[in-house]
Amino acid sequence: MKVLLVGNGAREHAIGWKLAASPRVDELMSLPGNPGLAGLGPVVEGISPTDIGAIAAMARVQGVDLVVVGPEVPLASGVVDAVEALGIPAFGPTRAAARLESSKRFAKEVMARAGVATAVSDTFSEPEPVIEHLAGRDGPFVVKADGLAAGKGVLVTDDRNEAVSWADRWLPEGPVVVEEFLDGPEVSVFAVCTEKGAAPLEPARDYKRLRDRDEGPNTGGMGAFSPVDDLPDGLLEETMHTVVEPTLATMAEMGHVFHGFLYAGLVLTREGPKVLEFNVRLGDPETQAILPRMETDLLDVLEGKTPEWSGAAAVNVVLAADGYPEAPVGGSVITGLDSMPSDVHVFHAGTRRDGKRILVDGGRVLSLVGVGDTIEQARDRAYEAASVVRWPGMQYRTDIGS
Ligand code: AMP
Ligand code: GLY
């Protein structure tokens, strides 16, 4: 079978690695791909991941049997609709169903109808009501852009004036959501949703802040580990029954059947788990720590088989470029990749090949994933690998999984 994978991050490299391991996958093509994915099969050049018509046409011309979509932007653009319209199976939600992620307002509406616990929120299109609303509350304040913003569309602050000016800045771009602050540890829960029903993946925890001890600015994610051992008993079953199943039922009632990965970002508050956000895809950097633990063929899982898991632990340490997240600096030569321990997974993200050399070409550059019997062992493997890789200004957290 010929599979086309859309995306170019370390999440997609991990998905591609796992798909390529399936005995049923003869060829794995990626679009736009990266130097890691290029080692697994042909990379399609010259088509943008949001040019959904061109992707669908290419899939037909190439005789692709299945399209798998990693990131949210092509999903929100309707790539699944376009591919399925040509009769080619695609894994991921339709454009209408992807609004669970691409519109926070839509997600809140679905959660309200489905009775899913989430932060109380209000949506605003004008500055004055935001000021009035914030004036009547105590911090911390949470202000969000309504649409997709690649992790940059959220401000959490104790400073009311900062919250107001942030809202002022975003309002010209679109509606702004002000929501209740949820207090507690976070965990990412994923369900694979197919015609056969919904099955959970193993949870993971990611690290959003740039620097150790959760300091510095929010990023796309600086690392992750799985399994997560401080979860309340039965959390996964509870999340399936109180979050995933009612959400899927409500989406179906609304005429937007959801197929694909449903990602619930949960906060474990004192009143129980509450949904911080839905995403309609796997998490990055969580996927890189989850898939090495999956024992089932990923292609079977996408077709509705309940996945089984190894007892191993995995820790993903993200290596980021100088200047990330504000202004990543590209072009440096990455050294040390030839001396990686063979049992560490090296997933590429913001890299580019230049002859024999691999250059930095993005914010999050590489994911190094150590696997071991315990989180400590997995972490040691990942950090040992990290100490071998170098380029000027390389940044990484030293506390992933500690
Ligand atoms: P998001 O882009 O929605 O994933 O938000 C990024 C991060 O901001 C989350 O991982 C949380 O740490 C924090 N955050 C977002 N919304 C809230 C909230 N309502 N309460 C507390 N923290 C939040
Ligand atoms: N891990 C955060 C995200 O994928 O959105």
Image (cartoon, grey):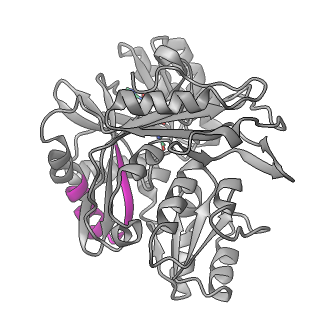
Question: Would you identify the image quadrant in which residue 162 lies?
Answer: top right
Q: Report the residue that reaches farthest toward the right.
A: 355
In the image shown, does 223 or 388 lie closer to the viewer?
388
The answer, for residue 206, to whether it is visible in the render is no
Q: Can you give x and y, in whole percent of width and height, for residue 10 in the image?
A: 58, 48
Q: Can you give x and y, in whole percent of width and height, for residue 121 in the image?
A: 35, 35
Residue, x 24% and y 32% (percent of image)?
229
Quadrant that contains the C terminus: top left
Residue, x 68% and y 88% (percent of image)?
61
Left or right for 373, reference 337: left
Q: Can you give x and y, in whole percent of width and height, for residue 130 in the image?
A: 48, 26
Q: Is residue 96 above or below residue 230?
A: below
- How many numbered callouts? 0
Q: Report the residue that reaches farthest toward the left.
A: 233
What are the residue bounds of the magenta stretch? 244-264
The answer, for residue 226, to whether it is visible in the render is yes
Magenta segment includes 254: yes
Q: Can you give x and y, in whole percent of width and height, for residue 145 in the image?
A: 53, 38
